[in-house]
Image (cartoon, grey):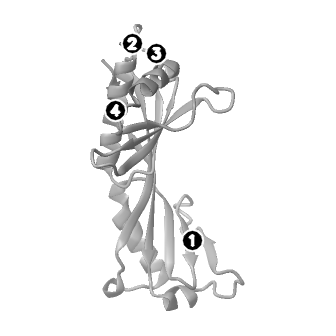
C-alpha cells in the first residue's frame, strides 16, 4: 500500500484589497507604472509584495505556510501604514506544496510508474470526474511529470498535481490545507490502484 509522507507547504500567495489612496500615495508613487514589486523585509527576502497603485490590490507571495499568513499580513499592513481598524479581508489565492510517495513498488523504495498511471486514468475517464489527466506522460522528453487536475465530488477544482516517476508530487493551486490533503488522498489512491 502507498503511504504519503506528510506534505510541506512551499509557498502561499494571498491578496489584500486596500483603499487606492493608501497604495497610490505609498513611497513608490514616483514610478511611471501602475504597480511596484517590493522586497521590503531584509530578513525575509522570499516575501514579495506587488502593490497596484490604481486598484488598491496588494499581492503577497513567499509565505512559507498557512499558519504564517496572519503574521505576514500584520507586517505588510504595518509596512504600508495601514492601521488595525482599516484592515481589509485577506484572500488566499493559491499555494504550492510537495511530498513524496514511498513504498509503492516491490522493493518499497521505488517511485511511481507514470505509464501505468496514465493507462489507468485513460481507462477510468468514462465514469470518473474527480481526477482528470491534463498533459501527457507519453512525451517524457518534453516534461518528465504527469499533470493531473483533481476535483471535489461537486465538480469544483481542488488543485493540480504534478506527479514525477521518482515519487515526488507537487500540489499547485490549492486554497487550504484541507484541499491539499484531499487532493493527495485522491492521488495516493490512484497510484495504489495503478500498481495492481
| Residue occupied by mark 4 | 127
Instruction: Report x, y in % for residue 167.
Output: 47, 25
- Dot 2 alpha-carbon crowd within 10 angstroms: few under 14, some 14 to 19, many 20 or more: few
Check if mark 1's residue and mark 4's residue have beta carbons within 8 Å: no
Marks 4/2: CA–CA distance = 31 Å
> At 53% across and 68% down in the image, what residue appears?
41
- Dot 3 alpha-carbon crowd within 10 angstroms: few under 14, some 14 to 19, many 20 or more: some
Marks 3/2: CA–CA distance = 6 Å
Which circle's residue, 1 or 4, is located before the other in the chain? Answer: 1
- Tell me the tag on residue 50: 1
- Tell me the tag on residue 14: none
> At 39% across and 62% down in the image, what residue appears?
92
Q: SS at mark 1?
A: strand
Marks 2/1: CA–CA distance = 45 Å
| Quadrant containing the C terminus in the rendered view | top left
Which circle's residue, 3 or 4, is located before the other in the chain? Answer: 3
Q: SS at mark 4?
A: loop
- Dot 4 alpha-carbon crowd within 10 angstroms: few under 14, some 14 to 19, many 20 or more: few
| Residue occupied by mark 2 | 108
Which circle's residue, 2 or 1, is located before the other in the chain? Answer: 1
| Residue occupied by mark 3 | 110
Determine if residue 9 is in view: yes
Q: Is residue 13 above or below residue 166?
A: below
Marks 1/3: CA–CA distance = 42 Å
Amino acid at each position: 500500500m502507498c503511504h504519503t509522507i506528510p506534505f510541506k507547504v512551499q509557498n502561499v500567495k494571498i491578496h489584500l484589497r486596500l483603499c487606492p489612496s493608501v497604495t497610490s500615495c505609498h513611497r513608490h508613487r514616483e514610478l511611471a507604472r501602475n504597480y511596484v514589486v517590493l522586497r521590503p523585509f531584509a530578513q525575509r527576502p522570499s516575501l514579495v509584495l506587488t502593490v497596484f497603485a490604481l486598484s488598491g490590490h496588494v499581492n503577497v507571495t513567499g509565505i512559507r505556510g498557512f499558519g504564517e499568513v496572519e503574521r505576514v499580513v500584520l507586517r505588510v499592513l504595518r509596512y504600508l501604514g495601514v492601521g488595525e481598524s482599516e484592515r481589509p479581508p485577506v484572500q488566499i489565492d493559491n499555494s504550492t506544496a510537495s511530498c513524496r510517495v514511498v513504498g509503492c513498488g516491490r522493493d518499497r523504495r521505488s517511485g511511481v510508474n507514470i505509464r501505468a498511471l496514465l493507462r489507468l486514468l485513460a481507462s477510468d475517464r468514462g465514469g470518473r470526474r474527480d481526477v482528470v489527466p491534463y498533459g501527457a506522460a507519453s512525451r517524457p522528453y518534453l516534461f518528465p511529470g504527469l499533470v493531473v487536475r483533481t476535483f471535489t465530488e461537486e465538480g469544483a477544482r481542488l488543485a493540480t498535481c504534478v506527479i514525477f516517476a521518482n515519487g515526488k508530487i507537487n500540489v499547485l493551486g490549492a486554497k487550504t490545507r484541507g484541499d491539499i490533503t484531499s487532493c493527495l488522498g485522491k492521488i495516493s489512491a490512484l497510484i495504489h490502484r495503478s500498481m495492481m
